[in-house]
Amino acid sequence: MKFLNASILCFFLLVSTGCSTIGAVWESGKTVVTGTVDAVVAGTSQLVGAVAEDVADTTAFVVDTTAGLVETVAQKIDEETDELQDESPNE
C-alpha cells in the first residue's frame, strides 16, 4: 500500500512538473517566434524604404544627367547652325 501511495504521489509530481515545463517552453517559443517575426517585418520595411529611396535618387540622377546632356547637345547644334548661317552670302 505504501508503494501505491508513493507511486501516485510521484505520478502527480511528475505530471505537474511536466505541465509547467511545457507551459514554459510554449511561452519561450512564442516569445522567440514573435520577436523574430517583428524583427523580420521591421527589417523588411527598412529595406523596402531604402530601395525606394535609392531608386528615386538614381532616377533623379539619370534625369539630371540626361537633361544636362540634351542641353549640351542643343548648345553644340546651335553653335554649328550659327556657323552655317554666318557662312551664307551677304546681300
Image (tube, helix red, strand yellow):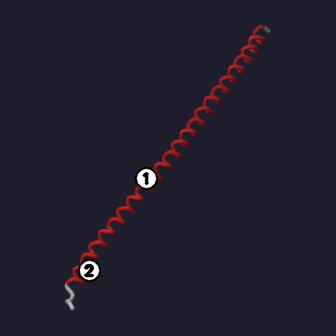
Q: Which residue is located at x 74 percent, y 17 percent?
A: 12
- Which amino acid, mark 1? Asp
Q: Which residue is located at x 75 percent, y 13 percent?
A: 9
Label 2: which secondary element: helix
Q: Is residue 8 left or right of residue 30?
A: right
Q: Where in the figure is residue 17, as x and y percent of width and height?
A: 68, 19
Tell which residue pokes out farthest to the right in this image: 1
Q: Is residue 89 left or right of residue 66?
A: left
Q: Tell me the CA gap for discs 1 and 2.
A: 40 Å
Q: Where in the figure is residue 27, as x and y percent of width and height?
A: 64, 29
Which of the pair 43/50 is nearer the observer? Answer: 50
Which of the pair 63/21 is nearer the observer? Answer: 63
Q: Is residue 63 left or right of residue 81?
A: right
- Which amino acid, mark 2? Thr
Earlier in the chain: of badge 1 and badge 2, it is 1
Category of crowding for the residue at label 1, using alpha-carbon neighbours closer than 10 angstroms: few (below 14), some (14–19), many (at least 20): few
Q: Which mark is residue 81?
A: 2
Q: Is residue 77 above or below residue 16?
A: below
Q: Which residue is located at x 72 percent, y 14 percent?
A: 10
Question: Residue 63 is drawn in which quadrant?
Answer: bottom left
Quarter of the image where the N terminus is located: top right
Which residue in the structure is indicated by mark 1? 54
Which of the pair 44/16 is nearer the observer? Answer: 44
Foreground label between 1 and 2? 2
Label 1: which secondary element: helix
Question: Residue 41 is drawn in which quadrant?
Answer: top right
Residue contact at pointers 1 and 2, CB within 8 angstroms? no
Q: Which residue is located at x 26 percent, y 80 percent?
A: 81
Q: Where in the figure is residue 29, as x and y percent of width and height?
A: 61, 32
Which of the pair 47/6 is nearer the observer? Answer: 47
